[in-house]
Image (spheres, rainbow, N blue to C red):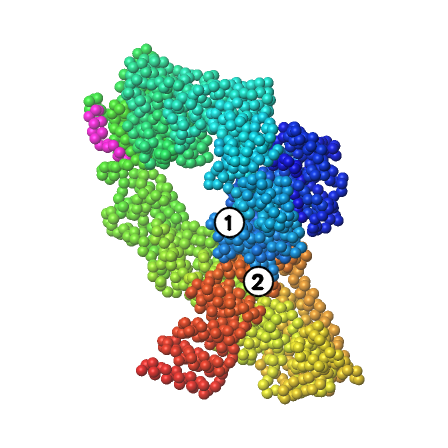
Amino acid sequence: MAPPSNKSKSKPNLKKDFQMTSKKPFKSAKNHPNGAVSSQQLPLQVEDDVPDFPRGGGSSLSREEINEARAVADNDFEADHRVLKKRHKEKRVQNRDQSTEDDLGSLFGDGIKGKLPRFANKITLKNVSPGMKLWGVIAEVNEKDIVVSLPGGLRGLVRACDAFDPVFGDEVKGDLENSFLSRIYHEGQLVSCIVLQVDDDRKEITKRKIWLSLRLSSLHRSLTLDAIQEGMVLSAYVKSIEDHGFILHFGLSAFEGFMPKHNQSEMRKIEVGQFLQGTVKSVERARKVVHLSSDPDMVSRSVTKEVKGISIDLLVPGMMVNARVQSTLENGVMFSFLTYFTGTVDLFNLDKMFSSSTWKNDYSKNMKFNARILFIDPSSRAVGLTLNPHLVNNKAPPSLVKVGDIFDQSKVVRVDKGSGLLLQIPTLPVPTPAYVNVSDIADKEVGKLDKSFKEGSLVRARVLGYRHLEGLATGILKTSAFEGLVFTHSDVKPGMVVKAKVIAVDSFGSIVQFASGVKALCPLRHMSEFEIAKPRKKFKAGVELVFRVLGCKSKRITVTHKKTLVKSKLEILSSFADATDGLVTHGWITKIEKHGCFVRFYNGVQGFAPRSELGLGQASDIHSMYHVEQVVKCRVVKCIPSSHRISLSFNITPTRASEDENVKPGSLVSGLVVRTTPETVIVDINASSGMKGTISLEHLADNQGLAASLISLIKPGHHFDELLVLDIEGNNIVLTAKYSLVNSTQQLPIDVSQLSCHSVVHGYICNIIETGCFVRFIGRLTGFAPKSKAIDDRRSDLSEVFYVGQSVRSNIVDVSSDVGRITLSLKQSLCCSTDAAFIQEYFLLEEKIAKLQGLDREGSELRWVDAFSICNIIEGKVHEIKDHGVVISFEEYNDVFGFISHHQLAGTSMKKNSAIQAAVLDVSKIDRVVDLSLKPEFINRSKKESSTIKALKKKRKREQKDLEVNQIVNAIVEIVKENYLVLSVPDYNFTIGYASLTDYNTQKLPHKQFTHGQSVSATVMALPAPATCGKLLLLLKHLGDGVDTSSSKRARKKSSYDVGSLIQAEITEIKPLELKVKFGSGFYGRIHITEVTDDNSAESPFSDYRIGQTLASRIVSKGSKTKNIKGGHGCELSIKPSLLKGSGEPDEGLPSEEFNYTYGQRVSGYVYKVDSDWAWLTISRDVNAQLYILDSSCEPCELAEFQNRLRVGKALSGHIITVNKEKKLLRLVMQAPADACGELDEKNYDRRLTCHLVEGSTVGGRISKILPGIGGLLVQIDQHQYGKVHFTELTDSWVSNPLSCYQEGQFVKCKVLEITRGVMGVVHVDLSLRSAPDASRDLGSSELNGGMHTSIQHVDKITDLHPDMVVQGYVKNVSSKGCFIMLSRKIDARILISKLSDNFVENPENEFPIGKLVVGKVLSVEPLSKRVEVTLRTSSALKEPKSGNNPVDHISVGDIISGRIKRIQPYGLFISIDHTNAVGLCHVSELSDDHIEDLETQFKAGEKVTAKVLTVDKERNRISLGLKKSYFKDEEVQASPGQSHDSAIGINDTIMLDEPTVTSQRNSASMEITNNESDNGHQPILADAESRALVPPLEVPLDDMETSDIEGDVGQTLVPVTNADTTAGEKKKRGAKRKAREEREQEIRAAEERQLEKDVPRNTDEFEKLIKSSPNNSYPWIKYMAFMLSLADIEKARSIAELALKRISSQEESEKLNIWVAYLNLENEYGNPPEEAVKKIFVRALQHCDSKKVHLALLEMYERTEQHKLADELFGTTVRKHCNSCKVWLRRIQSLVDRKSDGVQPVVNDALKRLPQHKHIKFLSKTAILEFKCGVPDRGRTLFESILRQHPKRTDLWSIYLDQEIKLGEADMIRALFERAISLSLPLKKMKFLFNKYLAYEKSTGDEKRIESVKAKAIEYAENNLA
């Protein structure tokens, strides 16, 4: 039984139950050396001789053990004794009899006998031990553990790995990070758990942790299938979700569960791995399946039945039982349940939550209750029960209170003397019970509780804790509990000022504790305003200090002791929502950077104060004023709560930088320089306002080099006319003088709303990081350009491409207004300049810098520049001659020098001090250098037209009128400067222009290299004007691709030729596919190879041309974008004779550009590219074609030389089979298609294929795969099309192993035999590799006897076959009933087991392996059913219908014969008599003199026996034999004349078994067999070995075998021998021959083994080489596995299978499936256990292969190995997943039919319910066929009749039905069915089909009357129909 635990009579240790720590240490036990009480001592151990099911009585413990237990009890509850000792009755309590004090801390069970205990069992931290089973409720579900509330208010922890069984480990391993525990379990869920470990903390027992396990494998360890009864409640995991329900796992592998979905009433979604409970509905013990129902009402009402012999191990927490009251205890009730057990219920688990002091009156003896098991201790056999109404209903009590809640109207329900109070807390919707321990009632000691508190009185209580399982709150009534702000973690708020006591100090900070016991952390940095080196000096344990709460997250509280924060009166900032603009608060600095400080506030809120808001000077360092962790007062400037951004300012009073409203970001101002520094310029804004602004070095100019020069020249007093206000930072105004920003002020955005996507905006780079650039506009508006969008080359470093402050043009990619995020692109292709502003600013700044330099030179001005006007002729003197040019000096200007480069000397020789006249090209005002030129075009131009300055000005005006803005001009590079080019425009009188080499975004990038004299294309951007410093500004084309330009008609006419113009072009380069030419003035073009001749027929069209030759050409196209043609306008030219005819007028004679090609059209072109599989041809300039390797030829030798044959430039002609108009691409083949299919494109691929490949055509192919066994070859005949070569179509002659001469990748010549299209449009092509498919095929090594060379004609049609015809074929499959052979691609023949050989065939599979070549004779042909019967027996080949040589004639009564048992029947044995065709019957009564019970145990098929002939019936050809020993007693057993030695049989088998020979003529006495060698030099005897080994023919000489020997042997095997024909000499002669033949057979076998050793891998290295050569072929992998299995290395075979699954490409699904099937077979044979191993592989295979194929493969394996039970189970799973598959249902039907099962009809009915309607006919018809072939024909007829009732006009169904009846052979049934068919009213065409079929059948029977009758009926039908 399970009695209660002993506790103090007057005071149960309720304080202990609620985990309240004692204020004094416990007394140590006397028997323990260190004073601690071990947990192992607490439970009382049951003696070995205690009965399993005691009925009660005396105690089984000794007196010493009882005393020891009492001593432990004294120690455990010392705290309660202290209270009692201080009372007046202390003496009486201590003087009580020691025997009446029970142990409150120990657990007792059904091993206790004698006097009943006084107290109920209760679980405490001291008596919890590993192995205990507890019921609990989940309180918390975390990521890595679960917190469970246990009985008695205890808490347990469950690790994630212990929350479920490892059966789900592989599936949920990755889900542990994705809240997998929260998907299985939820808070408030009741669970059964088992104690794994209890942490031993001797110092403080309340800190001991209880580690639990929720694994069902631990809880159900003793559960067996026999112990499960209906109505029992079980817990399980959801293992898998099926269509109709859930597969459940109970933690045990012995059985599984199933729960249907329609019984699943829970609304929440069920997932795999979910934990649930259910009631057992039924148990299938045979299938080991438990069916559950999860109906909550049924689960909550299910009571465990009393089962005889139930053990305590089967008890599970949460189990509901019928309990009977046995007695009441001091603090509970004792119950008996399940006959043998007792359990106790304590006060807090009674059925009444608010039990009064008279609660014992409610529990009289033998009262019945429904109770649930609360805990089980197997060691002490103690059981705890609960009557809690919530728990009895299997629901956790509701939690209606929170810790810290205060209730003023709490009602006292019960007063427990010395223990505490039971209160009723007024909660909604129902009140909650609460218990107040005696120590928590008052701050001072209470004398008598019953006097201080009366039942029904109201008190003020505060919730101290909550026991989730019992639904009981713990309360406190102390006055101090209502004081203070903090009682629990939930009371802690950020910013709260509290007092706390320091309890520990460490290097990371100090741990402090509030008055309520809540603990917090004060980090080291917050222990003081300043950094403290020794924290323990100020913070000592026990000191009480004032702190302020910084944050509270997940019960982790952080406080600060910084004096400024603690005493701050400012409003706190604890959320981003509180950050209102203008809010002033305290914070502390967490990080300092160059551009500002990060400040932290309460609850993790953080903001940023920029440098401008720190109150620092311009050159001040932030670190000099602030440090990390410093407390600062700051003001919120702006907050964006959605993006968690706060802008701060350390300037508490906002100061307005400008009193002038005109000075604001984005406005233009003027400024006067006040002072300068190396990095900044300070200006006075608007001269008189008193406002100061700063211009940084980067903002002085767009050009970085000029900005550096400018800042060094600017002096105080310098005036800036236009400055742009970028931002106002406090009192500082940030200005810029950048020309790009000042001029685009109106376009610059100030707010995000002003931006639009894809617009280009000027800005400047404010910061560069590794991942991108920040670009700023006006104010703080900033965009970000990721690295991928900033530069084209991601490998470049952004700092090498851009610099901070650089002017850029940015393209707006994306704008997010919600978060203020702007994404930009800085790529030059998107942001290139559209004007000449960049170079214009350069020249303006250059002039400004020159003027400032003049001021430094004491008033020197720029008047000298006027004398050096552009293109003006000036005089000078050669000052110096240098390597790179000539320096010129001028008399009037001593500090100005000129320079003439070598390119501008124009060949003039110069001498020092010589006078010259030169033209001015460029003037550098800063360096005071003038670039000159002596070129005649500049000198003459000026001399002719510049007699006076006035005339020169008039000339310039005329020139300017000619040039237009945005006009494209051709220019010549004259001078290459550092930042720009000096260009001349020849078409406009060599006007000088200037173009920038770089742009805003490319200033740091290397610019394009230009050379002197180079021709470039440029756009006129600005004409000479004062704003351009009098210069013509151009924009180079490579910088301004995005410019929208327009040219005048006159400029366009001068700079190009029109299409169609006839020109003279000069060849500059000859390439294989084009001629490079030039024409006109600097124009270039090309002549494509297809533009030479009209028909592309010339082999080498460029062979007659040479470089420098001039050709008459016509322009056919301009501006080719596909080719990089040098210079000017790239033109496409043509020299076709047809185009050169006519005048040179434009557009005359040009061909139409329409793309018009049709299927089958013949085109010509030239090869321009060749790879391993494709050749690309150019048909014209814009049209290309493809030629696939297999379309180029059908000869294997030419295909192998594909790349060598087709060189670049080779002319080819082909026929079009596909057209792609979009890509202008054609697909060609070399052979003309069979017919025209009109216009085709790639979408009509199948149609193109059928047009291109027709039956009878010859094509080239490449072997893609050698199919295993007799599968033949898979040959690629097109890019995506494959054909199959049948095994009989591989060679011209019949050979043993036709696949041996082929290998993968080999090119072959194929003939298309047949093209068919499947249901889904898939095209199937049948091929042949025979050179003459219709010719006769030589027998090869299997010659027929008769001395003549025999050939066998290849049979394609069944009508070509006739009886007695000699045929040859390959074995297709073998079974115990015979085999099938392939005669041709479409014809198979059957050979029964009796027709395989003249002698007994013991193992057909070994003697007739698949693929073996055999020769036989046709016995019968059925053209209608296409059934062919063949025999391999030579005797049947020689049998004549009217032969008089009956084998029975040579057998007489009394003969002793030898033979072999052919078949065993219950009534006797059939014995095949040696050397004859006769078979005799030995009746069971003639087998033995004694009675034989079971024939199969005494005899075996194939066993050799000797028998006596009893009777011979020659008329009926029947022979009766006897085997009784009494028949042989009186006569000596001698070999009959018809009997020969075993050796003869052996040779006979060798010659005749596998290669029987047949002749058309025979001798009545014998048949001659010759040993003449065939053409390949092999004997027929070797064909057997060749076919078995599948190796090339053996080279074994057989000259020593005499012909006569073979002849004699064969003659004896075929002709019956009589007694008079043999003599003793003949027997001796045959013995010698037998010995010689045995020796020869051994030589042949040795030769076979040697040959096999050459080809078959013999070790792992050879297999490794084999699989490396073809890793995607499953066949060598499987052979490798088989090889390892032959070595008994099963693990190695498994590893090979795993390696194969990794190596084989994922695209080779069928090959991988083969490996999986082989793996399944391996585990089925060698797995441990096989069933589990196969399931594991099966589950893995489903993840990688087609589910249906894997299921069908496993079904086939189970059926093959006769594991019918597993097959049935698997079919159930398969049909659930693939219920719409007809194959699955037919496989099931096939299995049932093969097993002769009667369950076919239910499966048919089920299938018809699940299969789609359109599959019903297919399923029913195939099922009927299976019944006809292997099952019950009547059932097949029923199915056909049911189909025809619904579809009577389906002639195809009638045909199938008739075929099955014809095969069955019941003539009356067949004719009756035909009569029904021809009586139908069908269309004439269908009736004609039925009559023809009827007529064919009657012709096959040979009855002329019936034939005429059918014809008459047909005529009658026709006449009636026509009438």
Left or right of 133? Residue 1810 is left
Amino acid marked by disc 1: Glu
Q: Nearer the viewer, residue 1906 or 1100?
A: 1906
Q: What segment is highlighted magenta in the picture? A: 952-978
Q: Regarding mark 1 in the picture, which secondary structure is present there?
A: loop
Q: Is residue 220 above or below residue 764?
A: below
Using a 10 Å C-alpha cutoff, classify the residue at mark 1 as few (fewer than 14 neighbours), some (14 to 19) or many (20 or more).
some
Q: Which residue is mark 1?
A: 271
Instruction: Residue 973: say if magenta.
Output: yes
Mark closer to the chain start, 1 or 2: 1
Residue 404 seen in render: no
Q: Regarding mark 2 in the picture, which secondary structure is present there?
A: helix
> Which residue is located at x 61 percent, y 53 percent?
253
Q: Are marks 1 and 2 in contact (CB under 8 Å)?
A: no
> Which residue is located at x 37 percent, y 47 percent?
1074
> Which residue is located at x 48 percent, y 75 percent?
1837
Left or right of 1014? Residue 321 is right
Q: Position of residue 136 (x, y in %)?
A: 57, 43
Q: Position of residue 1260 (x, y in %)?
A: 47, 61
Q: Residue 959, located in which quarter of the rendered image?
A: top left
Left or right of 799? Residue 1720 is right
Instruction: Residue 1593: say if magenta.
Output: no
Q: Is residue 1218 above or below residue 446?
A: below
Q: Which residue is mark 2?
A: 1767
Q: Position of residue 343 (x, y in %)?
A: 64, 46
Q: Nearer the viewer, residue 1593 or 1443?
A: 1443
The image quadrant where one finds the C terminus is: bottom left
Using a 10 Å C-alpha cutoff, classify the residue at mark 2 as few (fewer than 14 neighbours), some (14 to 19) or many (20 or more).
many
Amino acid marked by disc 2: Ala
* Nearer the camera: disc 1 or disc 2: 1
